Image: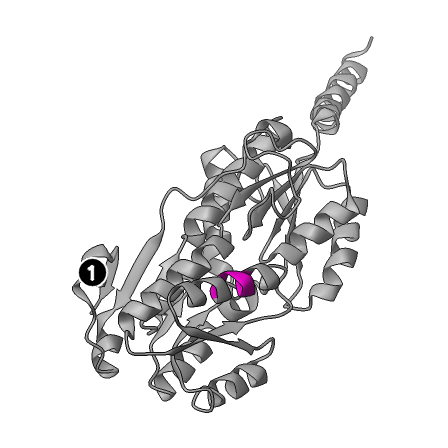
Amino acid sequence: MRRRELITLLSGAAVAWPLAARAQQPPIPVIGFLNNTTPETYAPFLAAFRRGLGQVGYIEGQNVAIEYRWGRNQHERLPDFAKELVQRAVTVIVACGGDQAVRAARAATSTIPIVATIGSDPVEAGYVRSLNRPEGNLTAVSVFATQLVAKRLELARELAPDAVTMGFLANSNNTNYKLDKREIEEMARTLNRKAVILHAGTEDECDAAFADLAKHQVGALIVESDAFFNEITVRLVVLAARHSLPVVFPRREFAVAGGLLSYGTSLTEAYRQLGIYAGRVLNGSKPAELPILLPSRYELVLNLKTAKALRISVPTAILVRADEVIE
């Protein structure tokens, strides 16, 4: 073989080898992220989700891709979004931002792994048969929102011991609405109080609900744990201040924004755990092998500045139990 032909042959092989090597590399896995709200509202929780992924070795854009589908509080769009992710043949579906997303994902596939956040009891809601052995293709991080409704009513009574009527701001579109309503009414009877359910699924309906508080002589208000209410945190805090009413909110973010008191699980921590579980599925774990994660702690956050503005004397029992006091 002549020298020129040998050089040409070797050069061609040098080019072909990297191309062949790249062709043999498996495609990076794809996470289908199905959420009923907006990327703006869930930015801090999405950051926590990515941190959880990173703890298991996955970095978006490097060794994992994420296909986002945001419902923007139009839950009727979620089934079509879930079907799109199934057709995209994603590796795992992350369903969050309300149980509507979980239901849509489950209806779309029984084979693709689903990792979800769930606000109700996963067994009672019919998502799994057992917390320790979920079976099927779904596992979850539970925030047990419904089970905390009664506790928030107790806190409201402590803040407003003379209030005879307690209001409950609820979104009837929430899949946990009936359970939440039952919890609030049963606890109100136990505490010898009257419960008034105020319905709101839009911002205008929230304005109207707060306007009705005086008519019902509501002395304190509890806000349901709901993805839409998370979306309008500041608006609800402003309405509470405008009506000079003690309100117990479901998330720390409300108290940070100026709400009087919040009690609930940490969504930031829940989404970090969600990222870890999604990463474990990418590493080969099956949902049935991953027990439903329950909250390890609940956050009681008091905004003392708001309490002073409302001229509320916060009971010592709440002050000593508070995980965080904002002054």
Q: Position of residue 279 (x, y in %)?
A: 55, 35
- Judging depth in this view, the residue of 89 and 208 nearest the camera is 208
Q: Is residue 156 left or right of residue 195?
A: left
Q: Is residue 203 left or right of residue 20?
A: left
Quarter of the N terminus within the rendering: top right
Boundaries of the magenta span: 180-184
Quarter of the C terminus within the rendering: bottom left
- In reply to whether residue 160 is colored magenta, the answer given is no
Identified at 57% across, 40% down, the residue is 62
Tag 1 secondary structure: helix
Identified at 31% across, 58% down, the residue is 300
Q: Main secondary structure of the magenta part?
A: helix
Question: Quadrant of residue 159 in the image?
Answer: bottom left
Identified at 78% across, 21% down, the residue is 8
Compared to 129, does 193 lie above or below? below
Q: Position of residue 281 (x, y in %)?
A: 60, 32
Which amino acid lies under the numbered mark 1 shown in the image of this protein? Ala
Residue 145 in view, yes or no = no
Q: Position of residue 106 (x, y in %)?
A: 73, 46
Neighbourhood count class around disc 1 (C-alpha, 10 Å): few under 14, some 14–19, many 20 upward: few
Compared to 289, does 203 lie above or below? below
Q: Is residue 231 left or right of residue 257?
A: right
Residue 321 in view, yes or no = yes
Compared to 5, does 55 lie above or below? below
Question: Quadrant of residue 178 in the image?
Answer: bottom right
Q: Position of residue 88 (x, y in %)?
A: 78, 45
Identified at 20% across, 79% down, the residue is 308
- Judging depth in this view, the residue of 149 and 263 nearest the camera is 149
Question: Quadrant of residue 264 in the image?
Answer: bottom left
Residue to which mark 1 is pinned: 317
- Judging depth in this view, the residue of 27 and 229 nearest the camera is 229
